[in-house]
Image (cartoon, coloured by chain):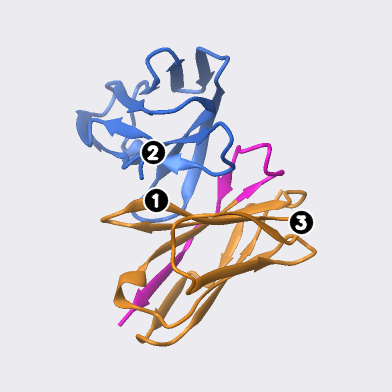
Chain colours: A orange, B blue
């Protein structure tokens, strides 16, 4: 069974631009969560999607958004990028929101210059 | 805010020795998971222990959970160079469908 796939692996963007990251969960998993990892703040929860609906959201500004498609694939978008958005963005896949055993992808390393 | 706190923050041992890492958390949980991360890459799921379990084994890994003390420990026996990584505990607080991570323990295995 294939694992969680995140694309792209690396991105370099300029301040003010926007970026879209993609995540394909494990086959059969319907819940996708996103996390941001930085050296200063550690791993922080961004949001969770299930059945194309955002069920939970972390304490991040509205510039961070996401969506989930009918095939459970998810995208997250960051608009008006700031230097502080440079981070490793990790996607986690779970069977459903009530089963929180989560499996992560390799992440997307975003650098904002 | 971080629910889990790992201790120690960094640990350096010789190959073949055992490594023990601890995690403390603040609220009631459904389960606790341990993950490994190599050099800023993705998180590898190691083991999940439910709140009604006290101990769980997987290969060279042994995890204990003490809900009365709100703490867990991860023991890696007979360590190998490939175990060099950061280890994180993650809890899902009851009523919250998200994982809360600690800051991690950086483990270095010296050959």
Quarter of the picture holding the C terminus of chain B = top left
Residue ID at (74%, 60%): A72
Residue B88 image label: 2
- Element type where label 1 sits in the image: strand
**What whole-number distance in Å separates the C-alpha atoms at marks 1 and 3?**
24 Å
The residue that mark 1 highlights is A43
- Element type where label 3 sits in the image: loop
Would you say residue A10 sits in the magenta stretch?
no
Q: In this rendering, do the residues under marks 2 and 1 share a single chain?
A: no
- Element type where label 2 sits in the image: strand
Instruction: Tell me the chain of label 3.
Output: A
Task: Characterize the local packing of mark 3: few (<14), some (14-19) or many (20 or more) Cα atoms within 10 angstroms.
Answer: some
Instruction: Tell me the chain of label 1.
Output: A
Q: Which residues are magenta?
A: A93-113
Residue B111 in sight in this render: no
Residue ID at (56%, 40%): B96
Q: In this rendering, do the residues under marks 3 and 2 share a single chain?
A: no
Would you say residue A108 sits in the magenta stretch?
yes
- Give residue B11's position: percent from left, percent from top: 21, 33
Is the C-beta separation of discs 2 and 1 under 8 Å?
A: yes
Residue A51 image label: 3
Q: In the figure, A17 relative to B39: above or below?
A: below
Q: Which residue is the extreme one toward the right?
A: A70
- Give residue A66's position: percent from left, percent from top: 60, 68
Task: Characterize the local packing of mark 1: few (<14), some (14-19) or many (20 or more) Cα atoms within 10 angstroms.
Answer: many
Which residue is more in the foreground, B42 or B99? B99
Which residue is more in the foreground, B64 or A10? B64
**What whole-number distance in Å separates the C-alpha atoms at marks 2 and 1?**
10 Å
Which residue is more in the foreground, A43 or B93? B93
């Amino acid at each position: 069974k294939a694992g969680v796939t995140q694309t792209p692996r690396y991105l370099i963007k300029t301040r003010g631009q926007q970026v879209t990251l993609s995540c394909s969960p494990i086959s059969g998993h319907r819940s996708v969560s996103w996390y941001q990892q930085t050296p200063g703040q550690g791993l922080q929860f961004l949001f969770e999607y299930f059945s194309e609906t955002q069920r939970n959201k972390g304490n991040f500004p509205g510039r961070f958004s996401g969506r989930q498609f009918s095939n459970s694939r998810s995208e997250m978008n960051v608009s008006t990028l700031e230097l502080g958005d440079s981070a490793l963005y990790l996607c986690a896949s779970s069977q459903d929101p009530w089963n929180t055993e989560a499996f992560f992808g390799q992440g997307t390393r975003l650098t904002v210059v | 805010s971080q629910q889990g706190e790992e201790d120690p923050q960094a640990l350096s041992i010789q190959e073949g020795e055992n490594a023990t890492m601890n995690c403390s958390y603040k609220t009631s949980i459904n389960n606790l998971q341990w993950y490994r991360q190599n050099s800023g890459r993705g998180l590898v799921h190691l083991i999940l222990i439910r709140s009604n379990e006290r101990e769980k084994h997987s290969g060279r890994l042994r995890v204990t959970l003490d809900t009365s003390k709100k703490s867990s420990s991860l023991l890696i026996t007979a360590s190998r160079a490939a175990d060099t990584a950061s280890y994180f505990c993650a809890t899902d607080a009851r009523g919250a469908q998200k994982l809360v991570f600690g800051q991690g323990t950086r483990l270095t295995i010296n050959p």
